[in-house]
Image (tube, helix red, strand yellow):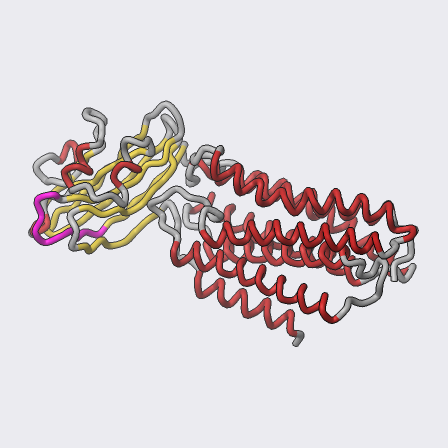
């Protein structure tokens, strides 16, 4: 078994161990806290079509607990979460007359759906959400008079649209177009992979199937598998509201591996490998190995951050973290290094490869800096209720553009024999 294969297996094992149990729109669990206010879940509801169903049970010793429904404006959820406000102050920010406080009391069954039997209060009810636009809603539990804390068992089912709407029913509003996007990209990548393999056969017959093109093939294969795996997970999710978080994480890991291999290929080409030289100097190989180890470690750390440290009470996307910022910085460093290496390769005399390297420098620069730019734009200017879909579409477009650009560039220079 090769070293690379062992590393891939080890990384997938790590993803399995770190993978979240859920993040489904069927949410079930138990709250047991000594506090008088606690966050439980969030969901992005579609205006006029969002529906929230709940089943809550708890011992009357903890009565009366309240189910709180906050929305995402600055005066509500951001004004209470991770603040020093008291329980009363956190309840006071909610708009009067909006039915955002549900008293889980058997004395008001027509409002809460609660009944009491054998000192156990059971509440079964549903709510519809109406707002001017799609909103993130945050669910919390409170009992400002408690001396015992909070304790209850809950089941939540959150949906958008009617049950027959396969593309929307189980999805949070910020995820509506992810499955269609993944299906589209999967189709394009299958066609691209087919073309890449046909071209590889032609190159092999001419003894031009060099190492960097083999890396390119692996990168395209991994990206195709990653998109397909994620698409399968989202398709299951559309059907049952549960899906497979593990498959989703494995798919994202495969895409990260594809990105790493493509980045390595660009760095090698920038140094003239397989274009003007057959091997790298030892010092250059060591520097490149260290950098790729750092970048790969950053990718794994990003998965660890999301699965173990990510706060669901804050609508952030993955790269809004120290690890994400570090990865974006490493990509900029890689661009600068690739630019310098390309200049050095040209200065040493690239001969007939000058035209290739001019195109390469432009295309590589666009690919390297597009990722950090996307991180910046998504963090600062993209609304939170569309951020997940925008990131999915933009990040896959960048990957696809990089793969197609390299393939076209290689096709136009196929008459040049590479060693």
In depth, the one of 200 and 286 nearer the eye is 286
In depth, the one of 22 and 264 nearer the eye is 264
Q: Position of residue 88 (x, y in %)?
A: 14, 38
Identify the image quadrant of residue 251. bottom right
Q: Is residue 256 left or right of residue 155?
A: right
Q: Residue at x 56, y 40 (%)?
A: 374
Q: Residue at x 17, y 51 (%)?
A: 35
Residue 105, compared with residue 350, is above or below; it is above
Is residue 368 visible to us here?
yes
Q: Residue at x 91, y 57 (%)?
A: 417
* Residues drawn in magenta: 144-153
Q: Is residue 184 left or right of residue 50?
A: right
Q: Quadrant of the C terminus?
A: bottom right
Is residue 185 visible to us here?
no
Q: Position of residue 299 (x, y in %)?
A: 54, 58
Magenta span has 149? yes
Q: Is residue 211 left or right of residue 33?
A: right
Magenta span has 224? no
Q: Quadrant of the N terminus?
A: bottom right
Q: Position of residue 394 (x, y in %)?
A: 59, 39
Q: Position of residue 255 (x, y in %)?
A: 60, 54
Question: How many discs mark residues in the rendered view?
Answer: 0
Q: Residue furthest bottom?
A: 1
Residue 272, compared with residue 321, is above or below; it is below
Predominant SS along the magenta part: loop
In depth, the one of 355 and 382 nearer the eye is 355
């Amino acid at each position: 078994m090769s070293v690379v294969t062992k590393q891939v297996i080890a990384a997938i094992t790590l993803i399995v161990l770190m993978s979240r149990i859920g993040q489904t729109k069927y949410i079930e669990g138990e709250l047991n806290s000594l506090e008088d206010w606690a966050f439980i879940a969030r969901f992005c509801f579609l205006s006029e079509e969002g529906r929230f169903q709940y089943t809550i049970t708890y011992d009357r010793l903890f009565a009366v607990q309240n189910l709180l429904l906050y929305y995402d404006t600055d005066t509500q959820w951001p004004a209470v979460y991770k603040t020093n406000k008291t329980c009363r102050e956190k309840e006071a920010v909610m708009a009067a007359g909006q039915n955002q406080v549900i008293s889980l009391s058997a004395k008001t069954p027509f409002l809460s759906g609660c009944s009491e039997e054998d000192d156990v209060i059971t509440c079964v009810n549903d709510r519809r959400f109406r707002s001017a636009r799609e909103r993130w809603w945050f669910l919390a539990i409170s009992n400002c008079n408690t001396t015992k804390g909070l304790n209850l068992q809950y089941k939540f089912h959150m949906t958008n649209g009617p049950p027959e709407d396969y593309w929307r029913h189980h999805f949070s509003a910020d995820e509506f177009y992810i499955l269609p996007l993944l299906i589209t990209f999967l189709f394009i990548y299958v066609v691209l992979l087919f073309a890449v393999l046909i071209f590889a056969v032609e190159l092999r017959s001419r003894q031009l199937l060099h190492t960097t093109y083999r890396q390119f093939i692996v990168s395209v294969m991994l990206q195709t598998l990653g998109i397909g795996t994620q698409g399968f997970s989202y398709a299951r999710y559309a059907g049952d509201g549960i899906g497979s978080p593990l498959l989703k994480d494995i798919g994202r890991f495969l895409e990260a591996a594809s990105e790493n291999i493509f980045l390595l290929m660009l760095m090698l080409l920038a140094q003239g490998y397989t274009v003007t030289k057959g091997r790298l100097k030892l010092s250059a190989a060591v520097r490149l190995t260290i950098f790729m180890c750092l970048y790969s470690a950053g990718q794994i750390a990003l998965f660890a951050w999301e699965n173990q440290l990510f706060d669901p009470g804050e609508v952030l996307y993955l790269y809004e973290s120290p690890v994400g910022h570090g990865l974006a910085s490493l990509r900029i460093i890689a661009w600068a290094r690739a630019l310098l290496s390309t200049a050095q390769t040209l200065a040493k005399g690239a001969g007939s490869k000058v035209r290739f390297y001019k195109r390469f420098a432009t295309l590589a620069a666009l690919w390297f800096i597009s990722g950090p730019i996307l991180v910046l734009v998504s963090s600062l200017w993209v609304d939170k209720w569309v951020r997940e879909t925008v990131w999915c579409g933009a990040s896959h477009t960048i990957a696809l553009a990089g793969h197609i650009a390299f393939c076209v560039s290689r096709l136009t220079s196929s008459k040049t024999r590479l060693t």
